[in-house]
């Protein structure tokens, strides 16, 4: 990692404190993005910078009890002065901001460029598979949520997701990993853009579902 990206990493690291969205997550997304970019015609500066900066405002969103902060939008705003100080061109700054804004699943801002699509895919894959399971339960502990909740999904969407399957969670203490899977994670593979990500996503999603099936059986005393 060259000097300018190392400086971005240091700035981002100071902003993050939530272990589910720590620098470890950022670097997994960064490395997976570079993997997907191999043999692709992409602007590596844009991809690297957007991967490092995509969650810089995550803690600010988590600490906003009103639910009005969208970390994707705020991260894009926070990125601008950092990038300008490091000498990025205005064109690249705008491109990086667009990548950051469109990386979020629960918004209508779809990634349009190859760089944005790669970032989206890399970020989404970090919520499924073994790492996704681990992060889910970090989130459960942080938010006093449930490890399992036997609910009617349609009713839950009405009551706690604002009536939309991709709506924002209103009361995090009512949420659980298997609700997250039923309302978001099982649809992820179909939302991915790159062939590499779709292949990995299918395998990781299957692993996650197998874990949830066993968890349910153990909770119900069947295993």
Image (spheres, rainbow, N blue to C red):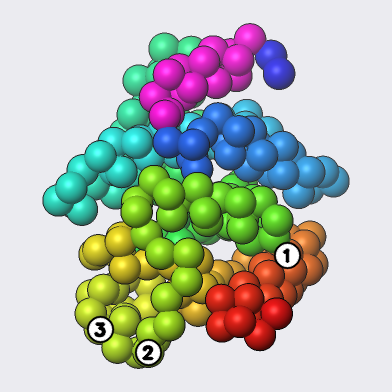
Nearest the camera: 56 or 220?
A: 220
Q: Determine whether label 2 and label 3 are within 8 Å by CB.
A: no
Q: Disc 1 or 3, which lies upstream in sequence?
A: 3
- Secondary structure category for the residue under label 3: helix
**Residue 203 vs residue 161: left or right?**
right
Q: Disc 2 or 1, which lies upstream in sequence?
A: 2
Q: Which residues are magenta?
A: 3-17
Q: CA distance from mark 1 to mark 3?
A: 28 Å
Residue at numbered disc 3: 158
Q: CA distance from mark 2 to mark 1?
A: 25 Å
Identify the image quadrant of the N terminus.
top right
Q: Determine whether label 1 and label 3 are within 8 Å by CB.
A: no
Residue at the (47%, 64%) spot, across then down: 147
Task: Indicate which label's residue lies in the foreground, 2 or 1.
Answer: 2
Residue at numbered disc 2: 152
Residue at numbered disc 1: 204
Residue at the (47%, 71%) spot, across then down: 148
């Amino acid at each position: 990692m060259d000097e300018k990206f190392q400086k971005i990493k240091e700035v981002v690291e100071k902003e993050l404190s939530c272990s589910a969205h720590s620098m470890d997550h950022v670097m997994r997304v960064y490395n997976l993005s570079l993997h997907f970019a191999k043999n692709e015609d992409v602007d590596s500066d844009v991809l690297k910078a957007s991967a490092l900066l995509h969650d810089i405002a995550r803690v600010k969103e988590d600490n906003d009890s009103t639910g009005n902060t969208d970390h994707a939008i705020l991260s894009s705003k926070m990125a601008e002065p950092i990038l300008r100080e490091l000498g990025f061109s205005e064109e690249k700054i705008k491109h990086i901001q667009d990548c950051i804004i469109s990386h979020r699943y629960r918004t209508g801002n779809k990634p349009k460029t190859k760089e944005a699509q790669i970032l989206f895919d890399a970020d989404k894959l970090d919520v499924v598979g073994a790492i996704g399971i681990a992060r889910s339960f970090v989130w459960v502990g942080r938010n006093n949520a449930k490890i399992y909740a036997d609910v009617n999904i349609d009713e839950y969407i009405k009551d706690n997701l604002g009536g939309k399957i991709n709506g924002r969670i209103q009361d995090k203490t009512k949420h659980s990993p298997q609700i997250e899977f039923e309302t978001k994670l099982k649809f992820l593979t179909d939302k991915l853009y790159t062939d590499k990500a779709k292949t990995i996503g299918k395998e990781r999603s299957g692993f996650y579902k197998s874990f949830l099936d066993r968890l349910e059986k153990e909770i119900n005393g069947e295993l």
